[in-house]
Image: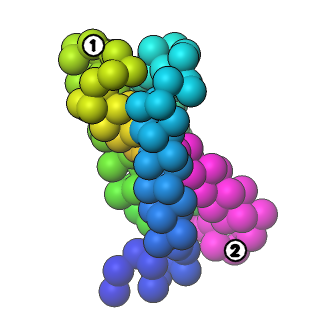
């Protein structure tokens, strides 16, 4: 039995992935047409948020395992963790590639990297929100949170 059947959760789902792709394509096209002048700031902020959200999630998992409390966070990470990891690693890789390639509005590679950074950043944000919602729902239902 996989985690989705066991815990009845969806993670970010297909709608989140499609929404991320649409946002990434739109962001890349707008950047290629010089309509987003502050793309460098976006990429730096996306990298910082990606790193901080990874540290917070790891800290939450460690504290939850050390305190042996409610395993709701672990259940939610099991369901939405793949989406979160893909978004975080994708944001870090695409953002780093965009910064090292140099960001110019006339470069096709820059537009692709900026679009990929936006895609993975939105995917990561959707996953983080999904994890928070799942954790809140699981904590509100105390019988689910009891140790199994």
Percent x, y of residue 104 = 34, 16
Tag 1, which secondary structure?
Answer: loop
* Camera-side mark, 2 or 1: 1
Dot 2, how many residues are within 10 Å of its Cα: few (below 14), some (14-19), or many (20+)? few
**Residue wearing tag 1:** 102
Report which quarter residue 141 is drawn in.
bottom right
Mark 2 or mark 1, which has the lower sequence index?
1
Identify the secondary structure beneath mark 2: helix
- In magenta, the rendered stretch is 122-148
**Residue 16 position in % (x across, y down):** 53, 62
Name the magenta segment's main secondary structure: helix
Residue at image position (22%, 17%) is 101
The residue lying furthest to the right in this view is 140
Can residue 41 be seen by looking at this rendering? yes
Question: Residue 128 colored magenta?
Answer: yes
Which colour assignment does the render follow? rainbow
Q: Does the magenta-highlighted stretch encompass residue 8?
A: no
For residue 125, side relative to residue 81 (left or right): right
| In-front residue for pair 69/51 | 51
The mark found on residue 143 in the picture is 2
Q: Are marks 2 and 1 in contact (CB under 8 Å)?
A: no
- The answer to whether 8 is drawn above or below residue 98 in the figure is below
């Amino acid at each position: 039995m996989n985690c989705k059947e066991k815990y009845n959760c969806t993670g970010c789902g297909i709608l989140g992935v499609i929404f991320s792709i649409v946002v990434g394509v739109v962001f890349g096209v707008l950047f290629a047409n010089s309509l987003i002048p502050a793309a460098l700031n976006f990429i730096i902020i996306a990298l910082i948020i990606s790193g901080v959200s990874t540290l917070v999630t790891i800290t939450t998992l460690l504290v939850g395992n050390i305190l042996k409390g409610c395993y709701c966070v672990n259940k939610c990470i099991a369901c939405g963790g793949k989406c979160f990891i893909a978004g975080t690693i994708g944001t870090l890789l695409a953002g780093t590639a965009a910064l090292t390639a140099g960001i110019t509005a006339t470069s096709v590679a820059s537009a692709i990297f900026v679009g990929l950074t936006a895609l993975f950043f939105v995917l990561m944000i959707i996953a983080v929100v999904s994890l928070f919602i799942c954790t809140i729902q699981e904590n509100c239902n105390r019988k689910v949170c009891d140790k199994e």
